[in-house]
Image (cartoon, coloured by chain):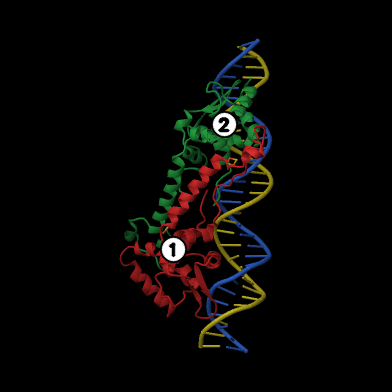
Chain colours: A green, B red, C yellow, D blue
Amino acid sequence: MKLSQGVEWGLHCTSLLAQAPADRPIRRDVLAGHYGLPDAYLAKHLQALTRAGVLHALPGPRGGYRLARSPERITVLDVVEAIEGSTSAFVCQEIRQRGTGAVSPDQCSNPCAIRSVMDQADAAWRDSLRGVTVADLVDRLPPGVRERNADLLAAAGG
Amino acid sequence: MKLSQGVEWGLHCTSLLAQAPADRPIRRDVLAGHYGLPDAYLAKHLQALTRAGVLHALPGPRGGYRLARSPERITVLDVVEAIEGSTSAFVCQEIRQRGTGAVSPDQCSNPCAIRSVMDQADAAWRDSLRGVTVADLVDRLPPGVRERNADLLAAAGG
DNA sequence: CGTATCCCGGATATCTATTATCCGCGATGT
DNA sequence: ACATCGCGGATAATAGATATCCGGGATACG
Ligand code: FES
Ligand code: FES
């Protein structure tokens, strides 16, 4: 069980975009260079974030990416689900209905207790991620980093 | 991000062992047959559970598996961590220290805010799993299933 | 209108983790 | 002694994650 590294990339890029002026989109290679990421592969994850409605992409010269809405309205869960999907990490294969101990289908109208427990834990995980926004992440940056990022983005955009 | 199917196997087998008489170990092929699982591969997961101290294995004729302690003292988290490991699903690669926007190492004494949020969600997930025991799982079985399992296990052991 | 820039989507290749099986070894009960 | 059964290593097939490339379409600018 391992989360895709794209989650780390997406969260960092999204919080970086939250530090950029809203009227000036950031090019993909600037984002990739800022964190030392492979440009072509980062594109895949940013496309997923765009499809999910977290980012907004502008083609053409002076194009790039910007947030689709204000950072206060983007939760960490939004970013994670855009990249990892919204399906539970636990996939029940209904083994209780297989083998010599198979339970008859009419006794399986209720979900299996094991499945319920795993789904509840998954919900707790998602609830925890839903409680933090991208704006919160920016607030927690070490002092001075935000100013430096603003300078770097301005230099790249000029 | 997908959990191994071994988690479902391990939880079902552990709760089935909780329904067996404590003095009579259950053979692996009986467990595999009960749920229609590949015997050789199930062995790998049961070995992991044994190494983790959840199950106790007895070699030789009349051998097999039994719980290492009472079902009330085995949490779902114990089983999950035996199979999936206890490391967080999110692996931080410290991308904040790479690329043109690299933050100086002395500013990275505190963990990255993104990493903290992901680790906190992981802790919430594990807390949720820790709150349920194997005994709870057996209690939630549909009526009649426990009796049938006891009969099947007795027949296989006789 | 033409052109340079930039994102989108599909195809492809590589690497890793998961899934699955087999066999020799050692331990155990009869 | 002998048959049974779990342990651990070796091995292979499959699926998923990682990474790159290219053609197509949209946009700004002259
Ligand atoms: S049958 Fe899938 S979790 Fe019980
Ligand atoms: S550097 Fe890894 S989560 Fe921020």
B128 or B40, which lies in front? B128
As shown in the figure, which amino acid type bears the numbered disc 1? His
Residue B97 percent location from the top left of the image:
65, 38
Query: With respect to residue A126, does A28 lie above or below?
Result: above
Q: Which residue is mark 1?
A: B12
Q: Secondary structure at mark 1?
A: helix
The picture quadrant for ligand 1 comes to bottom left
Which quadrant is home to the C terminus of chain A?
Answer: top right
Residue A142 percent location from the top left of the image:
58, 35
Q: Which mark is residue A16?
A: 2
Neighbor class of circle 2 (other Cα within 10 Å; few <14, some 14-19, many 20+) is many
Residue drawn at 54 percent across, 49 percent down: B89
Work out how far the residue at label 2 is from the one at label 1, CA to CA, in angstroms: 45 Å
Residue drawn at 60 percent across, 31 percent down: A145
As shown in the figure, which amino acid type bears the numbered disc 2? Leu
Query: With respect to residue A49, does B145 lie above or below?
Result: below
Q: Quadrant of residue B109?
A: top right
Neighbor class of circle 1 (other Cα within 10 Å; few <14, some 14-19, many 20+) is many
State whether label 1 is within 8 Å of ligand 1.
yes
Residue B15 visible in the picture: no
Q: Is residue B134 left or right of residue C16?
A: left
Query: With respect to residue B99, does B118 lie above or below?
Result: below
Q: Is residue B96 left or right of residue A102?
A: right
Residue A116 visible in the picture: yes
Q: Secondary structure at mark 2?
A: helix
Q: Which mark is residue A94?
A: none
Judging from the image, mark 2 belongs to the subunit labelled A
Q: Quadrant of residue A131?
A: top left
